[in-house]
């Protein structure tokens, strides 16, 4: 018996494969037909938002492989679910949670987090690639998530209200627009700024006092040649709450290893005095070890 996720993927894939245009364009078309009721996948009454997200995600991944788009790497589900769990714990007891993803891509990470938090959550997504925004927008409609989209360079001025939680799988590399980068504290005296540094600065600028930034970062973030300007910025403008190392097994190349960085924006109302959580995620296939690890996260989030 096939699952809802498999049926949704098959429904989208069959249409996209029979289409003469680009696979990803066809994914958008068939999702619009689904929205309008012209054509729909066969799903059970118990279909969840996660079933829908995963079904669409499988089709998008297939389309990206066909189009060879190296800059559009989707955040692995295992990492997305962990970010969702962390964000959900940080949001416990809060109503009307607002989220921001300044490098939203297809929205997959953002929607994983929204599906986890569930209660009364709205989001803002920034993405410069028009195709990815259209994929993200049609997915948001099918998931019935209230999301506002901005098609722009997220490091340019953002006209976005401050949010409770910013989440982002940070784009890694140099930012070529030196003139714009001069608006940032993290612009070095010589050479280009790191885009991932500027994304952290921009994200925290648009996070409410007391709010959090949850970022997927290069594991060597604090060892780069620009870390001498990153350290003072983080110390002055943020509170480092946690650095969580992701398992090496998730990455084909150790040089591409990632960690999770959790920052809090200082607030006079919220005094944070406890130590930084330094942790390593166990092998994610080890259910017992993961259960203990998530308990550790849950205790940390309430401190």
Image: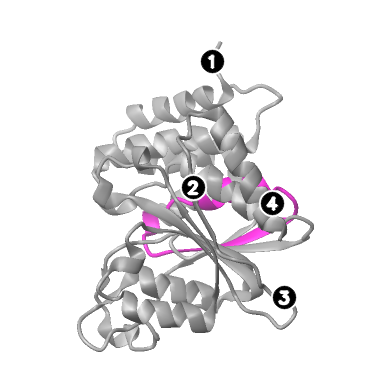
> What range is drawn magenta here?
105-131
235 to the left or right of 119: left
C-beta proximity under 8 Å, tags 1 and 3: no
Q: Is residue 118 above or below residue 161?
A: above
Which residue is identified by label 1? Answer: 2
Which residue is identified by label 3? Answer: 270
Q: CA distance from mark 1 to mark 3?
A: 48 Å
First along the sequence among labels 1 and 3: 1
SS at badge 3: loop
Q: What residue lies at 27% left-to-right and 40% top-to-bottom?
A: 252
C-beta proximity under 8 Å, tags 3 and 4: no
268 to the left or right of 67: right
Tag of residue 83? none
Q: CA distance from mark 3 to mark 4?
A: 18 Å
Dot in front, 3 or 4: 4
Q: Residues within 10 Å of mark 1 (few under 14, many from 20)?
A: few
- Residue 66 occupies which quadrant of the picture? top left
First along the sequence among labels 3 and 2: 2
Q: Is residue 6 above or below residue 25?
A: above
First along the sequence among labels 1 and 2: 1
128 to the left or right of 54: left
Which residue is identified by label 2? Answer: 108
C-beta proximity under 8 Å, tags 1 and 2: no
First along the sequence among labels 4 and 2: 2
C-beta proximity under 8 Å, tags 4 and 2: no
Q: Is residue 265 magenta?
A: no
SS at badge 1: loop
**Between 277 and 62, the one nearer to me in the picture:** 277
């Amino acid at each position: 018996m096939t699952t809802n996720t498999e049926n949704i993927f098959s429904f989208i894939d069959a249409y996209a494969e029979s289409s003469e245009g680009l696979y990803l364009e066809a994914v958008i078309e068939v999702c619009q037909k689904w929205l309008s009721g012209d054509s729909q996948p066969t799903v059970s009454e118990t279909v969840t938002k996660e079933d829908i997200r995963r079904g669409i995600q499988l089709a998008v991944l297939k389309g990206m492989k066909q189009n060879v788009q190296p800059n559009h790497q989707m955040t692995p589900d295992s990492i997305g679910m962990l970010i969702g769990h962390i964000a959900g714990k940080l949001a416990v007891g809060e109503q009307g949670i607002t989220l921001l993803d300044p490098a939203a891509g297809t929205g997959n990470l953002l929607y994983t987090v929204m599906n986890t938090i569930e209660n009364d959550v709205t989001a803002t997504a920034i993405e410069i690639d028009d195709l990815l925004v259209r994929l993200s927008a049609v997915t948001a409609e099918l998931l019935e998530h209230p999301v506002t989209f901005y098609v722009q360079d997220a490091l340019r001025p953002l006209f976005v209200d401050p949010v409770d939680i910013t989440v982002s799988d940070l784009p890694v590399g140099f930012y070529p627009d030196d003139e714009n980068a001069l608006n940032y504290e993290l612009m070095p005296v010589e050479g280009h700024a790191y885009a991932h540094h500027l994304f952290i600065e921009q994200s925290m600028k648009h996070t409410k006092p007391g709010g959090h930034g949850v970022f997927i970062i290069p594991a060597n973030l604090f060892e780069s040649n620009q870390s001498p300007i990153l350290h003072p910025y983080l110390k002055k403008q943020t509170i480092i709450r946690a650095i969580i190392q992701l398992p090496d097994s998730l990455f084909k190349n150790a040089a591409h290893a990632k960690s999770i960085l959790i920052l809090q924006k200082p607030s006079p109302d919220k005094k944070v005095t406890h130590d930084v959580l330094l942790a390593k995620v166990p092998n994610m296939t080890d259910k017992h070890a993961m259960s203990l690890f998530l308990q550790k996260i849950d205790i940390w989030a309430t401190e």
